Structures are given as structure tokens and as C-alpha cells.
Amino acid sequence: MGRRPKLTSEELVSQADLNCCPDLDDSHPGQAEDYLNSLVTAVWIYDIENYCIVWANEAALALWESESLEELKSRDFKPGASDAVQQTLKDYQQIFKSGKSLSRIWRYSPKGILKEAYCQLSGYTLSDGRIAVLTEAITVDLIDNNSGASSVITLSTYDMDGHFISGNPPFLETQNHDYSHLKSLFPYTDDYQKIRNIIEHTGRFEGDVQIYSNKQILWHRLVVSICEHDNLEASLLVQQFNIDDMKNKELALEKEVITDPLTGLLNRRGLKNAVKDKGNFVIFYIDLDGFKLVNDSLGHTVGDQVLRHMGTRLTSGLFQKGHACRFGGDEFIWLIDEEKLKDSVEKTANSLLKAMNQPFIDSEDRPVTVSASVGVAHYPRDGKDFEDLVLKADAAMYLAKKQGKHCWVNYISGMESSLQRHSQLAQYLYKALENQEFQLYYQPIFDTKAKRIHSFEALLRWDSVDIGRVPTDECIRVAEEIGIITDIEKWVIDTAIGDLNLLRGIFDSDLAMAINVSSQYFSNSEFVSRVVRELNKKGLSGSAINIELTEGTLLSDLNHHDNAATRVNDAGIPISIDDFGTGYSSLAYLHQIPATLVKIDGSFTRRVEEDSTMIMSIKHLIESLKLNTIVEGVETAEQSKILNSLGLFLQQGYGLGLPQPLAFYQDEGNVRNLAGLQ
């Protein structure tokens, strides 16, 4: 016989779906036991209070190295059960009473043989009404490495003053550091104090923390809860899950997302993240004078050297205490808290000009000099939020340019009169909604393996009769700010659903439509019912569309008890995470989002020809959670070829198919040309 193939933990545990069997009962073995004994999955029932196994199938006997059920039932597990393990199981009892189940990796040592098993734990009511643990387990060696199973759980208990009481074997094996007191686990005392404060107020802490483990400082998901005991003093139960690999990948991804790859400075997203919860601060908006001339005359390589040198100067000397950002092209922002500003704004701005104007020697030993124009704005005096403040500083910088460059200008109210586009767009948006100036374009998403169009994404276009084509991002941003985004998106959904039947008639009958939805409309109480009503009008099921949402929208929605994502999921409408990798979500929380599909942002696609490591890491993460993947931003045949070799076959981008109006797809010649690209 050949080797038995490895299965995922979900596939193995699913073989023991106890809901489809008759009740287990020692007096009526029959069909239920025959069924369970045929499974690869080990199944047993553990009596928590009596420290014994009361039933097990044949696979469980093998796992426990037992020759018979009678022998296994006779074993007393109390001598090897630490207080921490026993308290954990009692904690689980409360969870089981609410009908919930848990997934854990547990370590066993039957007859001194160390084993690890992926366990699905749920409650089982014994004949006397007590709750036992029903365990469905498969040894780790049979689980696919990419199945997403969590690390071995380590358990310990401490008294309410933080003194050690007990720990299970995995805890004792990994804690080479002093663990006599709870605070000894933490390399950073602030973390310990923060956890103590939270426990005192709420009775429970759960979060990602660095602690000592295996003579290292590693990231763990830590759960600390207060446990009450009959006739005994309360204690602290500490559960540790090693998430170091996943957390480090997450942090690397977060850094990549918020960092400009050329200069190493923050990018726009990173700077916006850095100013969250800040008090008073000043931003200096810097635009290089003469940079285009350097690029045109000396080449882009020298231009890149200029940008890197400017980045170094903005993080050195006087400027180390601030946040430096490459905002785009040859534009930079330097931001600092007012309380950290050593000199006056005037002196600081002049120091910036001097630093930017210093010549440097390029790689060809040529002296290169550029200057800068600087606009200054203060928060909260000059702007209500970060975006508003940037606009004000940009207006001041624009005036500095007009005044002859190589100077700085402090923002004064009204200075932005030359930058009226925002208010102009707001005015014309109201008009566009009334005059039906919007149009939907549909971009194909290709299944390159099956060589067919998998689905379409509906994209908003606005051709204003007054100002021409308006970029979609700009249109949506202003619409959200003035509160009409919901009305626009109602029109988008109605139109896209209506056009889907037409596109299905041209292409495949199972074609789906992806529709982007803002957080404002998604959180609207009428959103789900209205979408379902529109689908019913057109005779379509929920699976005909796919609601695309950003990571930020989904994670914010998780905080609500009656969240919209659950209602959408219950309606049978798939959810996809859009632009994945560009948000602030913790990868450790991704499994909580009820999505079926993840769209990898095009910024990773652009780098895939040089380095495919990051996109492969994201792919493995997504696949471990049993989600499908679409890669955005495919611009070249080479990118598509590389993605195919990585097993990423659902692709979208201008290199495969441009967004087009419905009329384009109703032309037979265009459809034939599209078929040639598939």
C-alpha cells in the first residue's frame, strides 16, 4: 500500500461529525460505535471531575496506547493533571454549556510516548447531567503543514498576587526563564502592568504579547483570566499560544505596507497611522525644486539617489524626533509634536530649507543640488483632521512655489482659495446624482487555469458635464465626506445586479458580480434587506454577487454584536476582502472575518517579478484559512505567468482586461477578442 496522504485538520475532524450519528450510550453500542470505530479520527469522552475517560473509539485506543476500552477507562489521570490543566478544562465547561466548541493542539504522553494532536473539543452531557469533554483528535503528523493549526497550548496558574502555582508539561518545558512570579514572564514591565490593570477592571485579558519562552523573547497570544474555586481563593489561569512566526510575518507585512521602498521613510498610509491620537503637531510639506531637471538631465538613477539622500536628511540631526514621510514623487512631509519642537517654526523651516539645499556627490562623482519649497500648517489650529491639514500645508507650499521657490510659507486661513477642487466636486456631485451622470464599467476577473472569465467587478465612473472625468477615488472620498455615498452605492448595486443577467447571457450562466461597498453603506441597517430584495427582483441568488469590503471596514464591523458581515453571510451573499495587505488588520484576527475570498493588492503584484516571497506568504496564509484568492493589478504577461506558476489563477488587471461599459460586451467583435485573451 502507498503512504496515506496527509489531510487538513478540518478534513480529518469532519469525518467524525457526531451530529449525524445516534447518541452514544454504553448500553446500546450498535450503529453509533460501529460508525465511530471506522473513523481515522480518534474520539473519546473525558469526565473532568473524575479524571477518567468514559468512552473511546478504536482510533483513540491507538492514540492512548491502550489494548482495550476497559483498560483505558480504568486509568486515573489525576496524578498527571496539573491544577492549570484541570482549571482550563473547567473553564471549557462553561464555554461548552453555551453550545460552543474549541480547537486546540494538546500534548499527550501515554505510556511515556510523547504525542501531539489537533483536537476539536466540545461538550457532552453525561447521564447524571454533568458536562464532559468530547474530543475529536488527529495526531499532528497527519496534518498538512499549511492547515493553519495553532501551536501547542501552554497552561499555568498563579495566585492573585502573581506567585506561581502550577503549569502543564509544555509550559514547564518551554519556560527556561524564571517563572516564579507572573511578571517574570514579561521582558517589558509595561506589558505586565497593562495586563494587571485590565484584569483588575474586566477579569480577563486577551492579546498579543512578547514573553520569555525557550530562552528567547517570542510573540504569544496570551489569555489571562480570573478563576473562582469552591472554598478556595481565586487564581489566575494563563493560556499561551505561540504565534511568533505568524506575528513576525504580520509585522513585516505591516512595515512594508507603511514604508516607502525607495527611501525607507513612512509612506502616506504610514504617516496617517503615526498621527493617530496625537495632540498638537506641525507638518512641513516639502516639494523639491529642480527635481524634474535632475531626472531629465542626469537620469532616474540619479533622481532616486536624490530622493534617498533627502530621506536620510529628514531623519538625521535636528529632525530625528519627528516623523518623515515620502508623500509621493518628489514631495515629503516632516511632522513633529509641538512640545518636541526645540526651535521656533521659523527656525525649523529655515533649517529644513538649508538641509534640503546641501549638495551631494552622485555615483558618478558629480555634485547635485536641489532646493525645496515648504508649506507649514498646525493641528488643530489649521485643520480638523490629518487630510484637511495636508491640504492646508499643500496650499501654503503652492504659494511658496509661486513666490519664487526655496522659501517657506505658514498657512493662513483662506490661502487655499486657489485649491477649490474639493468644494467644487461636492457641488457637482449633488448635481451628478440628480442628472444621472454616473456610469458603471465592468472589469473581467479571469480564471487563467480554466481559460475563462470567472466574474466581473463593477467600477464607478463619473464623467461630469462641467469638469470632465473625475478619478473614482476622489469622487468616493468627497461623496463620503458630504454624506451622499449611500445614495450613490444604492444606484451602483441596482445597476450592477440588473446588468449581471445581461452579462450572464453573453458569457456564462454562473458568472458573478463583485461590488465595492463603503463602510457607511455597509453599516446601514437596511443594507442587507435592500440587496436581497434587488436580487429577488432579478431572480438571482445571493451567490450571484460578491460584496467587496476593505480590511478596516470588516474589522470595525466585528466589534458590533449584530454585525453586518454576519447578516450578509446569513443571506448567502459572499464577502471578499479588498486590497488585502494594505490595511491595519492583525493577521491573527483574519480567521474571524466571515469572508470567502481575499483580493491581494496590486502593490504586491508589481514586485512579483523581482521577489515573489511576500505574495507566496500571503497566499499560504489565505489558503490555510480555506479562503480563495484573487490577485489584483496584473499589468503584464510576465506577471500573469509568474502568478500561474505560484498557483494563483484568479487574476485581474489592465494587462488582462480593461474596465469597459456594458455596451462594449454587447458587441460580438469585442467578445470574440476577449475570448482570444482567455
Image (cartoon, rainbow, N blue to C red):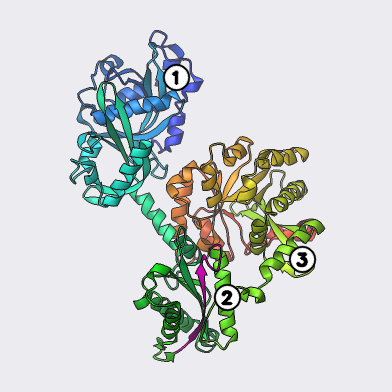
Q: Are marks 1 and 3 in contact (CB under 8 Å)?
A: no
- Residue bearing the label numbered 3: 464
Picture coordinates of residue 472, whole percent (x, y): 67, 62
The span from disc 2 to disc 3 (Cα, nearest Å) is: 32 Å
Q: Position of residue 515 (x, y in %)?
A: 66, 50
Which is closer to the viewer, label 1 or label 3?
Answer: 3
Camera-side residue of 357 and 117 = 357
The magenta-colored residue range is 369-385
Q: Amino acid at mark 1?
A: Tyr
Q: Nearer the viewer, residue 79 or 130?
A: 130
Tag 2 or tag 1, which sits nearer the N-term? Answer: 1
Specify the amino acid type for callout 2: Ile
- Residue located 55% across and 84% down the image: 292
Mark closest to the chain's N terminus, 1 or 3:
1
Residue 678 visible, this angle? no
The type of residue carrying mark 3 is Ser
Circle 2 SS class:
loop
**Which residue in the protein does label 2 denote?**
412
Answer whether residue 384 is magenta in the image. yes
